Image (tube, rainbow, N blue to C red):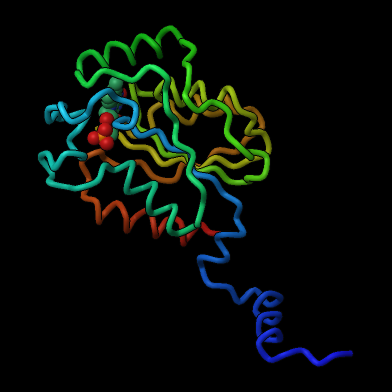
Amino acid sequence: MRKLSTGLLVLLIIMTTGILSPVSAAAAEKSLIISYDHRKNMGNTKKLSIDALSSATVYSGPTGEKKSTEQVIRDTIKSETKSKVFEIRVKKAYSTDYEKTVQRADEEIDRNKNIKFKTGKIPGLKKYKKIYLVTPIWHGDLPQPVRVLLRNNDFSGKTIVLFGVNLGSGFGSMVRSIREECPGAAVVKARAFYGDAKNNAVKKKVRNWIRKNRK
Ligand SMILES: Cc1cc2nc3c(=O)[nH]c(=O)nc-3n(C[C@H](O)[C@H](O)[C@H](O)COP(=O)(O)O)c2cc1C
């Protein structure tokens, strides 16, 4: 038999003994982040005025933070797990007017309306075992685009890890709704954050959660 080079031998030992860096161990997770980021689903956000509910964390509003809480969660999970990101994008953008958005969102949830997407089916969903769902809470529940997206894709046999963003409701009915829309999936409540939490604090908590719960 030909002699193995030292480099190849070391590589083989690393691969077979599980001495992997946290990142490469995570890469084997085959996880996907599904993210609903509201400002990517609004009209022209340049004209958006600072509003306590819909934009506080984005435009250096009252907290002075640079990123939205959803963005920090998504970026931190991504860098910790090397997951791909699937962004939910609705076909018809929401108004930048907060009151109009609330009116539309409430109606969609109350009537369990269908939503049309720019991106509907999730590519390669079959290969992912773990799904990180990053979403704000609306009307005490999942935003309707998130609910319909879950309904339109098959999550059976997968684990959905929920990171929610709220301004007081916590997870509300989100877990129950995910179970309704994703029969056969396991749901894990990871963490719920306040929309106006400090970016660094959120990052640290998400990172700790991921590292503690990494399998
Ligand atoms: C249409 C709409 C409905 C909302 N409903 C709730 C709610 O029921 N409970 C709650 O705690 N926050 C609610 N919020 C606040 C969002 O959870 C908030 O936007 C979220 O914390 C994310 O903050 P950000 O958009 O500044 O990132 C709502 C926001 C919108 C736009």
Locate residue 20, reporting x and y percent.
58, 73
> Where, quadrant-wise, is the C terminus in this rendering?
bottom right
> Where, quadrant-wise, is the N terminus in this rendering?
bottom right
Q: Give the quarter the ligand 1 occupies.
A: top left
Q: 3 or 197, which lies in front?
A: 3
Q: Is residue 10 left or right of residue 4?
A: left
Location of residue 75 with respect to 56 vertically, above or below = below
Q: 154 or 161, which lies in front?
A: 154
Locate residue 47, reporting x and y percent.
15, 26
User: Which residue is rendered at x = 57% and y = 22% of the image?
Assistant: 151
Locate residue 149, reporting x and y percent.
52, 25
User: Which residue is rendered at x = 68% and y = 77% of the image?
Assistant: 17
Location of residue 120 with respect to 15 vertically, above or below = above
Residue lying at the far right of the rendered structure: 1
Which quarter of the picture shows residue 54?
A: top left
| Residue 168 in view, yes or no | no
Q: Is residue 212 left or right of residue 54?
A: right
Which quarter of the picture shows residue 87?
A: top left
Location of residue 96 with respect to 32 vertically, above or below = above
User: Which residue is rendered at x = 26% and y = 40% of the image?
Assistant: 194
User: Which residue is rendered at x = 57% and y = 59% of the image?
Assistant: 27
Q: Is residue 19 left or right of residue 87?
A: right
Which quarter of the picture shows residue 155?
A: top right
